[in-house]
Image (cartoon, helix red, strand yellow):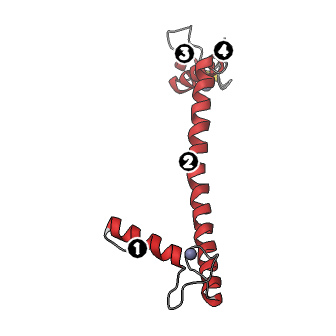
Amino acid sequence: MSKKCLNCRIEITERAIGKSTEKKYCSPKCRNRANSKKNYLKWKDTPEFKANRLIKQRIWVEKNRAHFNDLCREKNKEYQKKKREEARTKGFCLSCFKVPAKEGFLRCERCLTMRRDARKKNDRII
Ligand SMILES: [Zn+2]
Ligand SMILES: [Zn+2]
């Protein structure tokens, strides 16, 4: 008389069965695996599981959003640099790129004033 493991379908030897005739699995490993599979199937459709999965997804999105934001910031930096170079060759303000810079300065009147004010506030160059 032979029994088969309910998990891996391997034939359970007499020795493995020993005295326990109720043994359903060939090894504790198989029993654990089968139990966790059963638990997973049982748990899969519960609201808790779905909520848990949603949280995991949200965490993933958050992580990736940070990554995407980094990429955008990098691109923005490059864009700003390009704009600044363009403004420099045209003699435009290096802060707003929109109006010609004040004579003898790299920035327009408005931006110079803004920078001066900010410097006063923070007591350091921005
Ligand atoms: Zn097995
Ligand atoms: Zn300006």
Mark 1 → mark 4, Cα distance in angstroms? 90 Å
Packing grade of label 2 (10 A; few <14, some 14-19, many >=20) is few
On-image quarter of the C terminus: bottom left
Residue 87 higher or lower than 28, as above or below: below
Q: Can you say whether 98 is above or below 9 in the image?
A: below
Q: Amino acid at mark 4?
A: Ser
Is residue 113 toward the left or the right of residue 35 in the image?
A: left
Q: Position of residue 5 (x, y in %)?
A: 64, 20
- 97 vs 67, nearest the viewer: 97
**Residue at mark 4:** 2
Residue under numbered circle 1: 116
Residues at circles 2 and 4 in contact by the CB criterion of under 8 Å: no
Residue at image x 49%, y 9%? 19
Within 10 Å of disc 1 (Cα), the crowding (few <14, some 14-19, many 20+) is some
Q: CA distance from mark 2 to mark 3?
A: 49 Å
First in sequence: mark 4 vs mark 3: 4
Q: Residue at x 52, y 85 (%)?
A: 106
Instruction: Quote the CA–CA distance across marks 4 and 3.
Output: 10 Å
Q: Distance from label 1 to label 3 (Cα)?
A: 86 Å
Q: Contact (CB < 8 A) between labels 4 and 3? A: no
Whether the residue carrying mark 3 lies under 8 Å from ligand 1 is answered with no
